[in-house]
């Protein structure tokens, strides 16, 4: 599988159906359930459906999506980071999630910084958004470290929650 990009410690590549075991693990991790929500992905079959209707469909439709983040050293998957296109938002948005044992080690920032650069240079995206729950202080810190600015509050697609909206203008140098 061709890498989208490499950073100092990470390989970022498109997800594929062979990643279903990892997807089950990530989507049922405490951070995912708390800050993103239960996607009812409990089995490999559920994960395949999630991949087909989520990231794989997004690659086809938009040319980007959520990507698998793995360690260069081992190739082991540790999280996801990428770009989503939601009907509820005007511009594409940055998304990321990592397994608990890889949180707090700079991997999310390293991956997100690489994906932002990829969005700017390869995809020619002009504006990148991000949404997060107001209580998700770790994500907020990461978004601010990337240079994203708080834009206000938006409703979640299901209308049940208020989310903080962040924006970054991607200037092509």
Image: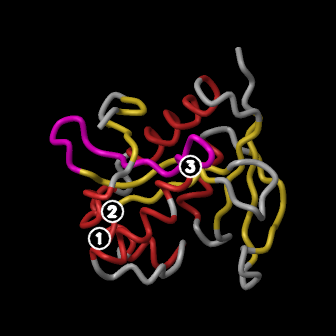
Q: Residue at x 35, y 68 (%)?
A: 48
Dot 3 and dot 1 residues touching (CB under 8 Å): no
Q: Where does the image place residue 157, in percent across and percent down from the top left?
A: 72, 74
Single out the residue that lies furthest toward the top. Answer: 173
Q: Residue at x 79, y 74 (%)?
A: 155
Q: Is residue 47 above or below residue 65?
A: below
Q: Provide the secondary structure element on which disc 3 rests.
A: helix
Q: Quadrant of residue 28?
A: bottom left
Numbered mark located on residue 138 in the image: none
Q: Find the distance from the CA under tag 2 to the CA under tag 1.
A: 8 Å
Please name whichever residue, 133 or 122, is drawn nearer the observer in this view of the structure.
Answer: 122
Residue on which the image places disc 1: 25
Please name whichever residue, 40 or 70, is drawn nearer the observer in this view of the structure.
Answer: 40
Single out the residue that lies furthest toward the left. Answer: 74
Single out the residue that lies furthest toward the front. Answer: 60
Tell me which numbered mark, 3 or 1, is placed earlier along the sequence: 1
Relative side of 121 to 23, left or right: right
Q: Find the distance from the CA under tag 3 to the CA under tag 1.
A: 23 Å
Closer to the observer: label 2 or label 1?
A: 1
Instruction: Identify the image quadrant of the N terminus.
Output: top left
Numbered mark located on residue 99 in the image: 2
Residue on which the image places disc 3: 142
Give the magenta part as a residue range: 59-76
Tell me which numbered mark, 3 or 2, is placed earlier along the sequence: 2
Q: Residue at x 61, y 53 (%)?
A: 84
Dot 2 and dot 1 residues touching (CB under 8 Å): yes
Query: Would you call the spot at circle 1 few (<14 residues within 10 Å), some (14-19), or many (20 or more)?
Result: some
The scheme the figure's colours follow is: secondary structure
Q: Find the distance from the CA under tag 3 to the CA under tag 2.
A: 16 Å
Relative side of 46 to 90, left or right: left
């Amino acid at each position: 599988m061709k890498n989208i990009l490499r950073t100092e410690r990470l390989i970022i590549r498109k997800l594929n159906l062979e990643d279903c075991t990892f997807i089950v693990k990530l989507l049922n991790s405490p951070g995912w359930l708390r800050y993103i929500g239960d996607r009812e992905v409990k089995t490999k079959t559920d994960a395949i459906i999630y991949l087909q209707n989520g990231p794989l469909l997004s690659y086809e439709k938009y040319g980007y999506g959520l990507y698998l983040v793995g360690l260069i050293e081992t190739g082991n998957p540790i999280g996801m980071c990428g770009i989503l296109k939601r009907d509820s938002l005007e511009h594409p948005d940055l998304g990321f999630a990592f397994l608990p044992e890889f949180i707090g080690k700079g991997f999310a920032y390293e991956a997100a910084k690489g994906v932002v650069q990829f969005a700017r240079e390869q995809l020619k995206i002009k504006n990148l958004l991000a949404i997060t729950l107001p209580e998700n202080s770790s994500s907020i810190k990461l978004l601010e470290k990337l240079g994203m600015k708080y834009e206000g509050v938006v409703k979640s697609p299901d209308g049940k929650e208020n989310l903080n909206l962040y924006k970054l203008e991607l200037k092509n140098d």
